[in-house]
Image (cartoon, rainbow, N blue to C red):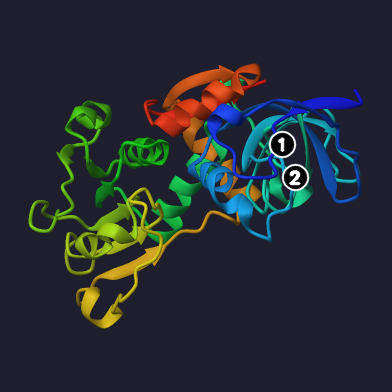
Amino acid sequence: MKTMKAVVLDKVTEASDITLSEYPVPEIRPGWVLVKVKAFGLNHSEQILRLNEIRADYIQKPVIPGIECVGEIADPSDSGLSAGQKVAALMGGMGRSFNGSYAEYALLPRRNVFTFESDLSWAELGAVPETYFTAWGSLFESLHLTEDDTLLIRGATCALGYAAIQIAKALGCKVAATTHRAEKLSLIQTADETLVDDGKLTGKLHGITKALDLVGPRNLRDTLNSVIKGGVVCQTGILGGVYTLNGFDPIKDIPNGVYLTGFFSNYPTQKIMTEIFTFLSNHKLTPVIGKVFDFDNIKEAIAAQDNGRINGKIVVKI
């Protein structure tokens, strides 16, 4: 094949303006591998790129978006991988510094491509890489979660929240989960305790030892006051639409004996990705998928992401 179908962006692009273009299949080069993309998930990060960040000078333009995918090795170059091998790829500049996964083929740095074994379908696998890596890193690298913890997941009705509930419950934790919409409480019923988040959780929950805050700076001070002394808060998401916390005073705003950390998902490793796929297999977990779209219907998939009516990960299958 000389050309492939791809989404190509060079300016702010609404869902209604998304098109599939004919684009040259990337030429292989040393240190990179060519992946035949089988599926990919849609992420908030790509929405930010498409609607705003695309204006930034540091974004390579035109660019194929997409920070994750699963697929097969089409050309291994000098990587030591084999043609046809199942791989997952994510982060490290995908869809920003170099072309990403919204395409039939993706040329990706070897360091961002990870082998795995799994019996999940391609659509199910498409929901794993970025979402489960971020949940895994937040829970274990940042929060040091154990089965004895009581975990608060604030902003749980998102793909990352569903994954975090799954992992924590499989581990044996007690989980409290929140949503800001009462009609979405049914979506997080696998948690031990659920409640509507009105922006003030302090005093409403008891015994919280660890907290995963997916709402972000908007309510971070309140989250810090919702855990017990010795508790740890990991701020990973920015669903609240506030990206920085001006006037934050660590001495006054972090309660004595409470710890604040974060997780930035830009540094996946083969070891961690193997641990994730092994955990999913051992616990017979299937990703929570809201809807699967065919690649030819990528415009509809992105429109569904923008209107926020899909509960669970949106996956595009090629």
Q: Which residue is mark 2?
A: 62
Image-based side of 130 in relation to 287, left or right: right
| Quarter of the image where one finds residue 20 | top right
Q: Residue furthest bottom?
A: 251
Rate crowding at label 1 as few (under 14), some (14 to 19) or many (20 or more) other CA atoms within 10 Å: many
Q: Reply above or below: 217 against 18.
A: below
> Which three-letter amino acid code belongs to the residue tagged 1?
Val
Q: Could you say which disc has been placed on residue 8 in the image?
A: 1
Q: Nearer the viewer, residue 92 or 176?
A: 92
| Residue 312 x/y as whole percent | 40, 29
Between marks 2 and 1, how big is the CA–CA gap? 6 Å
The residue lying at 19 percent from left, 55 percent from top is 208
Of the residues under marks 2 and 1, which one precedes in the sequence?
Answer: 1
Q: Reply above or below: 162 against 111.
A: above
> Which three-letter amino acid code belongs to the residue tagged 2?
Pro
The residue lying at 51 percent from left, 39 percent from top is 43
The residue lying at 37 percent from left, 26 percent from top is 309
Rate crowding at label 2 as few (under 14), some (14 to 19) or many (20 or more) other CA atoms within 10 Å: some
